[in-house]
Every structure is written in C-alpha cells, then in structure tokens.
C-alpha cells in the first residue's frame, strides 16, 4: 500500500482515512483506524469504563495490603489518590493519539518503535494483561463457587476432596465457568463491552455505598470505624520520616501507579471510539479520580467494622459476604451479593485485561488473527499462567512490571508529545514502506532506551543503597527511557 497524505481528512480535530488500509501484515478491520462516525463514546461512556474497571475486588483489597504493611487509612488513601493523579497524565496524553487518529495501541507504538519493533511493547503489555486477566477470573470463579455452594451444599464434595495446588475441583470448575463468561463478551465484540460498562457503572457505585452504610449503621458511625482502623496496622516498629517515605510510601506509590500502568499505555484501544479530546480527558478524570479512592475507602471502612462485629479483620469481600449470608440465614442475600461481585469483576476484567492483548495478538498477524481470536488466545494464556499462584506475589508483581511498562511509557510519551508534537502520518502507520519503517521495521533508538530504562530499575536490586531505583521502578525506568530516547532521536534527526 502506497497511500499518500491526501487520503486523510480532518473533522473537528479528528483525523480519519478516506480510504481504509487494505488487509495486510499491518492491518485488518479490527486494528484499522476508526472512522469519525464510529467515534461515539462521550464522557459518560469513558467515565463508566473507569467506574467499571475501578470497582473490583483488587481495589477493595488494595488498601488492605498497604495497611498491613504499616500505613494508616489516610496514608493509604493518599497513596492511591496520588498514584492515580500521576498515572492520569500519561494516560490522557496517550489517549490523545487514540482519539485524534482512531488507532489502537499496537498501531500507535509503531510511530516510536517501528512497524516491527512495535511488537515488543505491545506483547509485553499483553503478557501483563493476561496475568491480570487470570487473577480477576480466579477471583470471579471463587464468587461463583460460593454461590453454587450456597444453593447446593453438596457442591464442595465434588472431586472427593482431592486438591491440586491447594484447591479442589469445585474451585477450578467455577474458575473455568467464569472464564467462559468473559470469553462470551470477547466474542460479542466492543459494542457489548461498551453496553456492559455503561449499565454496570451506576449499579456498582450504588452497591458499594450500600455496603458502607451497612457497616456504618452496624457499628455506630464512620467515626467509630476510623478509630478502629488503627488496629488493622500490623507493623510494630516506628519508622523515621525518611524510612517511611523510601521503604514504605514510595514502593506502594509505585505499586499504585503500576496498578494502572498497563492502561496508561493501551488507553488508545478505548479512546479511538471517543467523540472528542474533551470527552476522553474529562471522562477519565471523572471516573478514575473519584471511584477508586471511594471504593478503597469502602474496603477500609467495612473491614474496620468487621473488627468490631466479628473480632477479626475480614479483608476478602467474598468471605465477608459469605459470613453475612450465614449470619442472616438468607441464601438470597449471599447470591445477590456474589452477583454484584461477579459484575464488578467482569466489568474490570473485560475492559482492562482482554481488549489490549486481543488487539496486540491480532497485530502479530492481522491477516490470520482477528480480535476475537486474539481474545481467545489471551484467555488461554490467562489459564496457563496459573493465576492462583500470582496472588501470592501481589506487591512484587505490581512493582516489577510497572518498572518495565514505565520505560515503554517514557518512550511513547516523549515521541508523541515532544518529538512529533502530537502529529502523526496516519497513512504511514499502515504502510510498510512509510516513515515508521525505520531500519527494517525497527527504531533502534527506542530499543536502546527501553533496555536502558529497565536496566536502571533492576540496578536497584544490586545493593541496598540503590534500592530506591527498584522501589520507584516506574519513575526511574520511565525518566531514563524518556531522556535517552529524546537524546538519540534528536541526534538522528
């Protein structure tokens, strides 16, 4: 394909191709740019997307990990809010390209990494998403297991009590059933995801608030709950301000950034359907900066209430809801509660962990792999990766991959904002002979900067005095990759 620049047109700041690229090893109908008429998501659709992704069990339990490590409730919420504010900046910047040009993430990174080199950041991000997909699907499967056990007590005895890696046949069957539900939405396509997120968002917020009012009403108010929250802290020794900052707050801040570091990269997969830049920016800020801190606070408050009610801190909402069900001797309460958890998990999982790898895997061979096929492959990886084991490495998992993705983020933000001034040649992104072909499809400057950023972050594991480099992996890797890429591209221009 040797398309010229004249085959694009600009409509209210949104660029589209007059003649869509033909199917080739660089394009198919799923990764071709959306037309302006297809960009129908307004700010409420974008906000609903973020509500659906933020209201999930990992968000509910995130502050639990911070408090168990030694932070109090307001320090935990500060880390969550600050982390979201930090990651919102690259998210909005990368989203700009998706909205303006209608392109998904695997195509967007061709501008900085090259038409072939783009596979590296695309697949790296996809592998992380597959891991998260497995974790969320496992959590959803546990909710299904609880629902079935409530309706049918004999469910737990299936398999004769035999276990594999600590879990029995009922748990694995429930996991596979929830996996199949996720795959249905992959098969139904992007419109079904948009519908699900829009419908689920207000329902999930309402259920979270109801849970908060339940806890507050049972123990005598929010003030009583927050006073009790100090008993959740497990750290015994007193830390100086600097020790607290570098050994506790910054690592968890990095982990919080890492929570959405994946979406900060592939947000164009969604904003390629946005009406305007204003819609994508205001929608993201509205959905992310309010919902996640609120739901994390609900997790802290409800867990603090369980200390008063039951004499123990119950951080796992699945276990808590099962206990409430038993306490009230009402299976319907338990079933309704678990359905809410399933919707929360499903809405997060599909949007955050399936769309990106589906597009990235499709990008490997557009003529042979569609979005549907890519999503199914991602789903299979989510099983093979054994997510029940990843749950035991939660913090290490977040910090480690956030550093890697921080390096990718530094490069693509530098390229789009500072090198190209937010101007791309849309035709050449799909042209194997275009300006983004670089050297046989590889931009060596991006590869060098990526490796350098990752190595700097890993240097933090060599000696305790350098630990801040790994503890702040997203920042150290991102800054190094950003600066080195800028220098290398300026020299080559």
Image: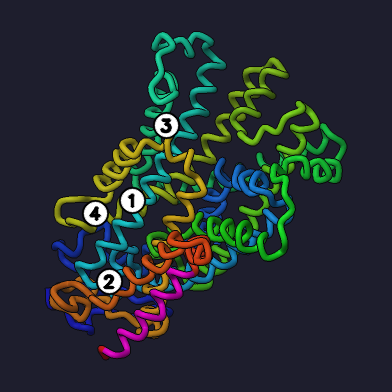
Q: Residue at x 64, y 36 (%)?
A: 315
Q: Earlier in the sequence, mark 3 or mark 4?
A: 3
Q: Residue 308's spot in the image, x, y percent? A: 80, 32
Q: Residue at x 25, y 53 (%)?
A: 361
Distance from label 3 to label 2 (Cα)? 38 Å
Distance from label 1 to label 4 (Cα)? 14 Å
Closer to the eye: label 2 or 1: 2
Secondary element at image label 3: helix
Counting other residues with Cα less than 10 Å from the Cα at mark 4, is it few (<14), some (14-19), or many (20 or more)? many
Residue 486 included in the magenta stretch of the image: yes
For label 3, the residue is: 178
Counting other residues with Cα less than 10 Å from the Cα at mark 3, is it few (<14), some (14-19), or many (20 or more)? many
Are circles 2 and 1 on residues that touch, CB within 8 Å?
A: no
Tell me where the magenta segment starts and ends, as one range: 476-491
Q: Earlier in the sequence, mark 1 or mark 4?
A: 1
For label 2, the residue is: 447
Q: Residue at x 18, y 76 (%)?
A: 437
**Main secondary structure found in the magenta portion:** helix
Q: Earlier in the sequence, mark 3 or mark 2?
A: 3
């Amino acid at each position: 394909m040797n398309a010229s620049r004249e085959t694009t047109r600009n409509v209210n700041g949104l660029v589209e191709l007059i003649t869509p690229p033909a199917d080739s090893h660089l394009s198919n109908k799923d990764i071709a740019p959306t037309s302006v008429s297809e960009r129908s998501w307004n700010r409420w659709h974008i906000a609903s997307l973020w509500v659906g992704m933020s209201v999930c069990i990992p968000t509910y339990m995130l502050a639990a990990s911070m408090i168990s490590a030694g932070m109090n409730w307001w320090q935990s919420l500060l880390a969550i809010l600050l982390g979201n504010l930090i990651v919102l900046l690259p998210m909005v910047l990368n989203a700009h390209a998706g909205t303006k040009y209608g392109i998904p993430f695997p195509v967007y990174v061709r501008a900085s990494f090259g038409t072939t080199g783009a596979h590296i950041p695309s697949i790296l991000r996809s592998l992380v998403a597959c891991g998260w997909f497995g974790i969320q699907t496992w959590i959803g499967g546990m909710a299904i297991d609880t629902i079935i056990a409530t309706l049918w007590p004999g469910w737990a005895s299936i398999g004769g009590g035999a276990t594999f890696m600590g879990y029995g046949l009922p748990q694995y069957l429930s996991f596979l059933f929830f996996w199949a539900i996720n795959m249905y939405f992959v098969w139904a396509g992007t419109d079904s995801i948009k519908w699900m997120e829009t419908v689920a968002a207000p329902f999930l917020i309402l259920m979270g608030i109801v849970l908060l009012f339940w806890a507050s009403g049972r123990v005598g108010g929010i003030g009583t709950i927050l006073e009790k929250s100090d008993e959740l802290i497990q750290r015994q020794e007193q830390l100086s301000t600097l020790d607290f900052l570098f050994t506790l707050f910054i690592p968890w801040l990095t982990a919080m950034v890492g929570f959405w570091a994946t979406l900060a990269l592939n947000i164009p997969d969604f904003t390629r359907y946005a009406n305007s830049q204003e819609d994508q920016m205001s929608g993201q800020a509205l959905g992310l900066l309010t919902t996640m801190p609120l739901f994390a606070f609900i997790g802290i408050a409800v867990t603090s209430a369980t200390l008063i009610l039951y004499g123990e801190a119950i951080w796992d909402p699945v276990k808590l809801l099962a206990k409430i069900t038993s306490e009230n001797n009402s299976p319907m309460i338990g079933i309704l509660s678990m359905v809410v958890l399933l919707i929360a998990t499903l809405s997060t999982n599909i949007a955050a962990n399936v769309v990106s790898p589906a597009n990235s895997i499709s990008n490997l061979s557009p003529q042979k792999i569609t979005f549907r096929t890519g999503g199914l492959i991602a789903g299979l990886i989510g099983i093979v990766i054994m997510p029940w084991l990843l749950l035991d490495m939660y913090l290490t998992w977040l910090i480690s991959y956030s550093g890697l993705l921080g390096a990718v983020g530094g490069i693509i933000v530098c390229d789009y904002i500072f090198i190209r001034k937010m101007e791309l040649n849309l035709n050449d992104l799909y042209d194997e002979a275009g300006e983004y072909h670089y050297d046989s499809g590889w931009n060596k400057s991006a590869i060098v900067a990526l490796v350098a950023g990752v190595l700097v972050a890993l240097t933090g594991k060599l000696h305790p005095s350098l630990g801040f480099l790994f503890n702040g992996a997203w920042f150290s890797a991102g800054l190094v990759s950003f600066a080195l890429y800028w220098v290398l591209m300026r020299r080559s221009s």
